[in-house]
Image (spheres, rainbow, N blue to C red):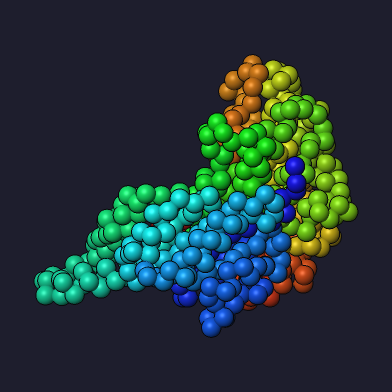
Amino acid sequence: MAEIKRFRLLIIGKTGCGKTTILSKLCGDDVADMPTAHERGKHDIERELDFRTNDKLVAHDSEGFEAGEEAQYRVVTEFIRRRGTMQDVNQRLHMVWYCVEMNTRPVQMAEEQFFGAKRDVPVIAIFTKFDNYVEDMVQQIQEEAEDDDPPKPLSEVDKLAEEKAQESFKDNYRSRLEKLPFPPEAIVALSRTHESTPEDSRLSELVRQTMAALIPSDDSRMTPERRQEQERLRELFVTAQTADLTVKVENAIATSMRIGYESLGKRPIERQRLIDLWNTKWSSQDSKSFSWLNRQLQQHVDFSPRLIGHENSPDFNQVEQWNEQLRQCAALEEMVSDSVIIMRYIFLLSTKDQAQVQRLIEWYDGNSSVAKQLREALVSKHSQNPKNNVGLKPLDLITIVSGLTFEAPDIKVSAEVKSGTRLPAASAEPQKGLFSKIFKKKDKHNK
C-alpha cells in the first residue's frame, strides 16, 4: 500500500468568511502561498496551498458559487468528482470544508444545489463567525427592550441572545441542510476562531467531526485495503492538525496502548507512531533525531526508577503483591502516559534544540510534579483491585492524564525556544513568564 504523505483538503467559501484563519489555526502556521483576493476564482482551485512548517496537509481554495453561476458550480463539482475518485491516494481529495459566514445569509439555492447532488468526498458544512451572529442578537434584544424599566441585566441579555442565536441556527441553517438529498456529514458553527490555541481550541468540534467523517463506513463493498487506507487518512489528519492538543493526547494514548498490549511486558516500548503523531522535528522522518529522542525516553521513562514495579521504587513491596499481568499493564500505562506528556511539552515549546529537550526530559524524570501525580493516580486506581489481570481502558487512562495539573518545566529557556514556541510573537520575555503562558491551566469557554 502506498505511503500517504499529505492530507488533501478543499475549502470553499467567499472572501472574508474566515478560511485563511481556519487553515492557519489548523496547521499552526500561515499558508505559504495563499492567493490574494483578486487572484481567487475558478481558475485557482487546482493551486496547491502549502504550509511553511507543516508538510502533512495541502489545501485547495475556492470562492464557491452563487445560485445561477453554473460555470463556477461545474468547476467546483468537477474538481471534487475528479479528485475524489483518483487512484493515487496522494493526489486524491480527502475532505471538503464548505464555509458560510453565519451573519450574511440563511441557507440559499447555492447550498440546495451543492447538497442536492451525490459526491464521493465527505463534506463538513462550517458556519463561521457565530459570535458576530450572537452580537447581532444582543443588539436586537437591547433595541426591543430599550424602554424597559428597569432594563434587563446584561447577563440576561447575553443568555437570551445565545438562546435565540442557537434556535435560529437550528431552524434556518442546520435543519434545512439536514433535509437536503445529500446533506453534509456534519454541520459546525465556529466562534472567535482567531483566538484559538492548541490548549484552548475553538476548532475542537470541526477537528472531531472531520475525524468522524473519516471513519471507514460499514459498507460491505469497501475492500479491506480501502478500509485500512481510510484509517491511515484519519491518523494522518490527527498528525497534521495542530489546532487541538487534546485530540493529539487522546489518539497518542489510544494508539500506543493498543500497540503496547501486543507485546505486554516488553521494554523498551514501541513509540514511533506516538512520536510521529505530534508532527515535530523529532518524528521518524528525521531518523537521527528520532533515534536520539527515543533513546532519551527509554532511559528516563522505560527504565526509570519511577516506573511502577521497579525494584528501587518506594512502593515496590506493595506493587509486588499485585497480579503479575496487572503490574505489566500499569507499567505500560505509565510509560505511554509519560511519553505522551513529554511530547506534549515538546510540541508546545516547538523546540528543535537537542540540549533543551534533554533538559526537559531529565526535569520530567527527576522533578516534575506531573510525573508524580500520574504515578500516584495509577497506583491508587490499581490498588483498589490488585488481583485484577487487566489494565485500564484507554478512555480511563485518557481521563487520568486529562485531569493532571501541568506545571511549567523548571528548565533554562534558549533563544531558539523563545522564538519558536506556539505563542503570539511577543514571547521574548523572562523564563517564568514564558512558561506560565504556555502551560497555565486555561478555563474552557463555550462557543
Residue displayed at 52% across by 45% down: 212
Query: Looking at the picture, does residue 128 appear above or below residue 257?
Result: below
**Residue under the image location 53 percent in, 34 percent down:** 219
The N terminus sits in image quarter: top right
Screen quadrant of the C terminus: bottom left
> Horizontally, is 134 left or right of 5 in the view?
left
- Where is residue 60 shown, x and y percent of the image? 59, 66
Residue 404 position within the rendered picture, expressed as x and y whole percent measured from the top left: 59, 45
Quadrant position of residue 215: top right
* Residue sitting at x 66%, y 59%: 57
Question: Between residues 200 and 303, which one lies in front from this camera angle?
Answer: 200
Where is residue 181? Give x, y as percent: 37, 49
Residue in the foreground of this view, choosing between 443 and 283? 283
Pinpoint residue 221: horizontal percent, then vertical percent: 56, 33
Q: Which residue lies furthest to the bottom in this view?
A: 38
Q: Residue at x 57, y 80 (%)?
A: 39
